[in-house]
Image: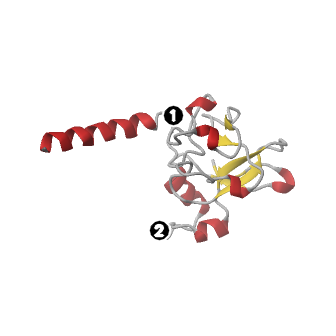
Amino acid sequence: MRTLHVSLFLTLMVVAVVGCAGCGDSKEQAGSACTMASQCYPLVPNPSTIHGMVVCLTQYQGGYCTHTCAADTDCCAINGECRTGFKQVCSPFENQPTTYCFLSCEAADIAAAPNGGVTDPNAFCQRFGGPSMSCRSTGGGSANRHFCG
């Protein structure tokens, strides 16, 4: 019986590690490093259920897993899409017409998050987005938002 438990534990550990290949240093699937969209959202059993088209923003250094959206409610809309439960925002990236989901580092969203007392936007991004992330502007013109990138 003990051997069965150890075997099951090891199997689950392998699945967890392999299942997140391509997740980069991001703790969220949005923002994970990528070179192509097929590397994004590995923890979603059926990525076709995501509200929008999954993309890898390759113009972002190291790539940035995300998906298209029409509103904030399209982000984290299905089970398994978001791992931390932190708010994501829908915004254009670098003044492009298409909008994408990004891990928010806006002050109100940080304050509402289970942030462990972290209120500084850059510290929030590094702790909950990934060690190489900082809070930056999406560059979306009048629809500009702040995100961990």
Q: What kind of residue is marked 2?
A: Gly
Mark 1 residue crowding within 10 angstroms, few (<14) / some (14–19) / many (20+):
many
Percent position (x, y) of residue 113?
A: 56, 67
Give the image location of residue 74, x and y in percent.
69, 52
In this picture, is 64 found above or below 114? above
Which element carries disc 1, helix, strand or loop? loop
Rendered residue at 59%/39% (across/down): 47
> Which of the two residues, 4 or 113, is positioned nearer the viewer here?
4
Name which residue lies at 66% across and 50% down: 102
In the drawing, what numbered circle is on residue 80? Answer: none
Crowd rating for badge 2 (residues with CA inside 10 Å; few <14, some 14–19, many 20+):
few
CA separation in Å, label 2 and label 1: 27 Å
Q: Amino acid at mark 1?
A: Gly
Nearest-to-viewer mark from 2 and 1:
1
Residue 11, compared with residue 69, is above or below; it is above
Q: Residue at x 57, y 68 (%)?
A: 119
Determine the secondary structure under disc 2: loop
Tell me which residue sits at (70%, 38%) in the image. Answer: 53
Against 116, is 130 above or below?
A: above
Say whether residue 61 is left or right of residue 137: left
User: Where is residue 10 drawn, in percent x and y?
Assistant: 26, 38
Examine the image and state in which quarter residue 14 appears: top left
Residue denoted by label 2: 116
What colour-coding does the image apply? secondary structure
Label drawn at residue 22:
1
Figure check: 86 above or below 38: below
Quarter in which the N terminus is drawn = top left
Q: Are marks 2 and 1 in contact (CB under 8 Å)?
A: no
